[in-house]
Image (tube, rainbow, N blue to C red):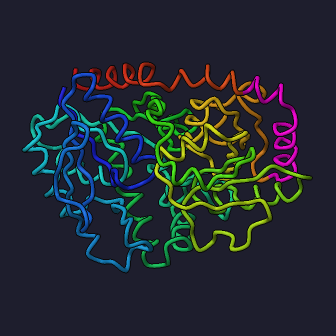
């Protein structure tokens, strides 16, 4: 089967969706499929190339010409509306690749919507990694807490506070208009968890969907990036991986850590933001922008992975990676996390935004070695649910369904 992936970003960019799309594309190639990726162009990368048997096309976007719209010049997202230049770029890629299935992964895929009216247009499936159908910010958060659902004026105000008044209004209006068009023109939605399906409103709307969790490829080289791993503490440590910001619960984690007596070291690995705490408690190390192989090697060495999110994590790829490394998870019982980790089986779950409860769970997992070993053993068994052998047949069956 010929498959075209559409993703805002693709390696060498670092991020959960980028790693996932790359892993899935490689696995499909190994299973005999013909795979190409359309992604956004960046000045320092060639317009096309081949990586691990996957043809990569980097297309332009009109929105990118307005640099003032983007907080980070290195990560310029696609808008929630079809982008004129991206539509033209995708038309050329479609003519070149002639896919049987177009598989979208973020808002760049909305630039395929105007092309769906053509005769014999490829089937269209859409993975939902975030809350891209229901939220202009993609995170389903309102005033620092999980949102109970979109409302027009509520979303306009919320997006304005997040992006700025003018940009926020434009993003929210585009989101409202084109989420409805996406709902009509996608043949099958592929949310990564039940929580993601519910939060995006596709269950209530009766839209066709199948839950296909993220795939976690085996960690091929645990000894890669030794120069980075030398920065890790020599003694046992707790590990946090992700954006070092409030939505990920970093402030809750640091408050809980301060409450522990004689705690092990705590390592934070991720991207920093203006809201990232400037002062860290003694024993805490912040390491920035590590590549995924190095992160997974750090997971294999830790006591436990801590996932203190206060936003409803759609899936939590780092959770699945920790399970694959045979490490316990201490996390928030929110979003898709409880679908991966069962409390008392593979980890310990606590209410989100509760530093006292998190401190208690960390104390247990650090001091109770038999508990930690039991959780670790169960984690390895649970990780089998997210291996390529478990997930790829489900994805192929979804493709066959929409092509048929």
| Vertical placement of residue 348 versus 143, above or below | above
Is residue 336 visible to us here? no
**Vertical order, 54 against 343 (above or below):** below
Q: Give the total number of marks visible in the rendering.
A: 0
Residue under the point 59% across and 60% down? 287
In the image, residue 118 lies at what x, y percent?
11, 42
Q: Is residue 333 left or right of residue 388?
A: right
> Is residue 21 visible from the viewing direction of this image?
yes
- Quadrant in the picture for the N terminus: top left
Relative depth, front residue between 316 and 228: 228
Q: Residue at 36%, 43% (x, y): give it.
A: 183
Please name whichever residue, 311 or 59, is drawn nearer the observer in this view of the structure.
59
In the rendered image, residue 227, in percent from the top left (x then y), is placed at: 51, 53
- Specify the quadrant of the image occupied by residue 64: bottom left
The foreground one among 212 and 154 is 212
Residue 145, located in which quarter of the rendered image?
bottom right
Image-based side of 289 in relation to 35, left or right: right
Residue at 29% over, 21% down? 401
Dominant secondary-structure state across the stretch colored magenta: helix
Residue displayed at 24% across by 44% down: 37
Does 296 appear in magenta?
no
The extreme right residue here reads 261
Left or right of residue 123: residue 207 = right
Residue 118 lies, with reference to residue 63, above or below; the image says above
- Tell me residue 277's x, y (percent): 69, 70
Residue 347 higher or lower than 11, as above or below: above
Corner quadrant of residue 63:
bottom left
Q: Does the magenta run of residues contain 374?
A: yes
> Where are the magenta residues, as a range?
354-375
Residue 86 image point, x, y percent: 21, 59
Q: Quadrant of the C terminus?
A: top left
């Amino acid at each position: 089967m010929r498959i075209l992936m559409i993703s805002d970003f693709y390696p060498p960019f670092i991020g959960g969706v980028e790693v996932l799309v790359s892993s899935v594309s490689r696995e499909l190639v190994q299973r005999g499929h013909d795979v190409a990726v359309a992604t956004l162009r960046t000045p320092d990368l060639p317009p096309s190339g081949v990586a691990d048997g996957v043809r990569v096309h980097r297309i332009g976007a009109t929105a990118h010409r307005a640099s003032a719209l983007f907080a980070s010049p290195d990560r310029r997202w696609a808008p929630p509306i079809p982008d004129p230049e991206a539509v033209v770029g995708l038309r050329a890629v479609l003519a070149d690749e002639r896919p049987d299935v177009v598989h979208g992964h973020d808002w760049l895929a909305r630039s395929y919507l105007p092309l769906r009216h053509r005769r014999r247009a490829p089937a269209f499936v859409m993975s939902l990694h975030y809350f891209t159908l229901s939220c202009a910010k993609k995170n389903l958060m309102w005033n620092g807490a999980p949102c109970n659902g979109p409302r027009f004026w509520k979303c306009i105000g919320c997006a304005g506070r997040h992006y700025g008044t003018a940009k926020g209004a434009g993003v929210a209006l585009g989101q409202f208009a084109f989420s409805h068009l996406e709902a009509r023109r996608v043949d099958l939605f592929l949310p990564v968890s039940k929580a993601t399906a519910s939060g995006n409103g596709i269950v209530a709307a009766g839209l066709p969907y199948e839950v296909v969790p993220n795939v976690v490829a085996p960690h091929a080289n645990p000894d890669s990036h030794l120069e980075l791993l030398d920065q890790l503490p020599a003694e046992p440590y707790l590990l946090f991986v992700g954006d070092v910001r409030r939505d990920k619960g970093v402030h809750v984690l640091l408050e809980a850590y301060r409450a522990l007596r004689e705690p092990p070291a705590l390592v934070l690995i991720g991207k920093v933001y203006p809201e990232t705490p400037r002062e860290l408690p003694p024993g805490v190390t912040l390491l920035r922008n590590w590549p995924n192989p190095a992160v997974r090697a750090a997971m294999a060495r830790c006591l436990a992975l801590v996932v203190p999110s206060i936003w409803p994590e759609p899936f939590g790829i780092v959770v699945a990676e920790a399970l694959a490394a045979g490490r316990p998870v201490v996390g928030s019982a929110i979003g898709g996390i409880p679908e991966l980790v069962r409390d008392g089986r593979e980890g310990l779950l606590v209410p989100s935004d509760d530093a006292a409860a998190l401190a208690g769970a960390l104390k247990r997992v650090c001091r109770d070695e038999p508990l930690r070993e039991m959780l670790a053993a169960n984690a390895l068994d649970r990780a089998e649910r997210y291996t390529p052998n478990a997930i790829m047949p489900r994805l192929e069956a979804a493709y066959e369904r929409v092509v048929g």
